[in-house]
């Protein structure tokens, strides 16, 4: 648990040894450091500490994943005179904080909020935001590309769970495939959170289609696969990011199921103090965010240029590879990839 005392000590240790030759860099951290999302905030904190250096003074602000928390966090960071803020994994907090930080001339590097509107409207709003998090449509792009690569010459089905998320993802994948000249042989849906899914399974059996893209949750897909296997219908399954979530311990996914999702483990990045839980999720992007922020601030100081200009017009070396931002503030990091279930865990696929 990241208690206020432990957080203060961690940040003090991270910023004590400052080079006498360089004015300390004041870097803001905006993340949920308490409450239900605290474990995710700890990933941001750990990543930023790993990406910072001796000349960095980290100032934490607890967004609480809420609008009120985001507004309060922004005010705290402005008062601390931070030069760049890295973090924000919740849309509500960013919505409330971004206008305040932009008005104060403080750039924001978001590592978690995927909603396209913040960067798509940047030219109109004047908001100082750059995105390391994937776009909200990256999941559909990656899923469609994987289906096209594997099933171009095979009949396939698009099946969703009837939720807003499921329908939206299935429709987005269908649109992309049709633009590439591919049409699903079957489009269907099912009622989620049922103990059995024989209705859908029998419909699939009647079509003869066994290559299925599922836009639904992991427990439901596991039940569908189980029920299909029980009547002798083997399914070749690709799913969305939801398949990477925790499953139902009573019904396991079959080995070989594929899922698309963002890179979520960063074992190759040196961070001796990081726990396994804190090395996941937002850890990698937070390291990159800290590295970009530090490099941009130093470049701006040396060249006498505004930080937004530096962020817009330069490439940055990070632990995840080189990063540049386009005119709307999107980074060119390719985070989404394909994973394959090995019976215990989802493992990144070669070339995925």
Image (cartoon, rainbow, N blue to C red):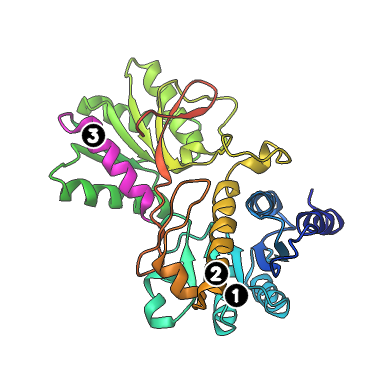
| Residue 320: percent from left, percent from top | 49, 46
Measure how far apart labels 1 and 2 are at the Cα level. 10 Å
Q: Which residue is mark 2?
A: 108
Pick whichever, 342 or 322, lies toward us.
322
Marks 1 and 2 close (CB-CB < 8 Å): yes
Measure how far apart labels 2 and 3 are at the Cα level. 36 Å
Give me the residue at 53% from left, 66% from top: 296
Report the residue that reaches farthest toward the bottom: 103
Of helix, strand and loop, which one carries label 3? Answer: helix
Residue 140 seen from this side: yes
Give me the residue at 46% from left, 59% from top: 114
The answer to whether residue 315 is above or below residue 261 is: below
Taking the image as shown, residue 124 lies to the left or right of residue 177, namely right
Crowd class of label 1 (few under 14; some 14 to 19; many from 20; radius 10 Å): many
Q: Which residue is mark 3?
A: 149
Q: Which residue is mark 1?
A: 97
Give the prevailing secondary structure in the magenta stretch: helix
Report the residue that reaches farthest toward the left: 181
Please state the extent of the stretch shown in magenta in the rendering: 137-154
Taking the image as shown, residue 305 lies to the left or right of residue 37, namely left
Q: Is 139 a magenta residue?
A: yes
Q: Earlier in the sequence, mark 1 or mark 2?
A: 1
Q: Earlier in the sequence, mark 2 or mark 3?
A: 2
């Amino acid at each position: 648990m990241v208690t206020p005392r432990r957080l203060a000590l961690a940040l003090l240790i991270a910023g004590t040894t400052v080079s006498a030759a360089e004015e300390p860099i004041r870097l803001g951290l905006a993340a949920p450091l308490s409450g239900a999302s605290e474990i995710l905030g700890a990933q941001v904190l750990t990543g930023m500490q790993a990406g910072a250096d001796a000349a960095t003074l980290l100032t934490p602000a607890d967004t609480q994943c809420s609008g009120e928390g985001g507004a309060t966090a922004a005010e705290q960071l402005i008062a601390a005179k931070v030069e760049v803020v890295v973090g924000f994994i919740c849309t509500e907090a960013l919505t409330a904080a971004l206008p305040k930080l932009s008005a104060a001339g403080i750039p924001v590097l978001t590592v978690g909020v995927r909603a396209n509107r913040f960067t798509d409207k940047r030219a109109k709003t004047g908001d100082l935001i750059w995105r390391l998090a994937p776009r909200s449509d990256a999941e559909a792009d990656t899923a469609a590309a994987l289906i096209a690569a594997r099933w171009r010459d095979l009949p396939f089905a698009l099946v969703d769970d009837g939720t807003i998320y499921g329908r939206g993802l299935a429709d987005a994948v269908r649109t992309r495939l049709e633009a590439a000249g591919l049409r699903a042989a079957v489009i269907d849906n099912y009622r989620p959170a049922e103990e059995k899914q024989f209705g859908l399974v029998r419909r699939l059996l009647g079509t003869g289609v066994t290559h299925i893209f599922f836009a639904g949750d992991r427990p439901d897909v596991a039940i569908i696969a189980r029920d299909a296997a029980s009547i002798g219908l083997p399914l070749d399954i690709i799913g969305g990011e939801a398949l990477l979530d925790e499953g139902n311990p009573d019904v396991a996914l079959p080995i070989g199921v594929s899922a698309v999702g963002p890179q979520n483990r960063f074992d190759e990045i040196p961070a001796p103090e990081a726990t396994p839980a804190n090395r996941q999720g937002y850890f990698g992007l937070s390291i990159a965010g800290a590295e970009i922020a530090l490099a941009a601030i130093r470049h701006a100081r040396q060249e006498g240029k505004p930080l937004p200009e530096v962020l817009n017009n330069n490439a940055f070396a990070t632990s995840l590879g080189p990063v540049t931002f386009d005119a709307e503030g999107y980074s060119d990091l390719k985070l989404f990839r394909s994973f394959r279930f090995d019976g215990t865990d989802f493992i990144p696929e070669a070339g995925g």
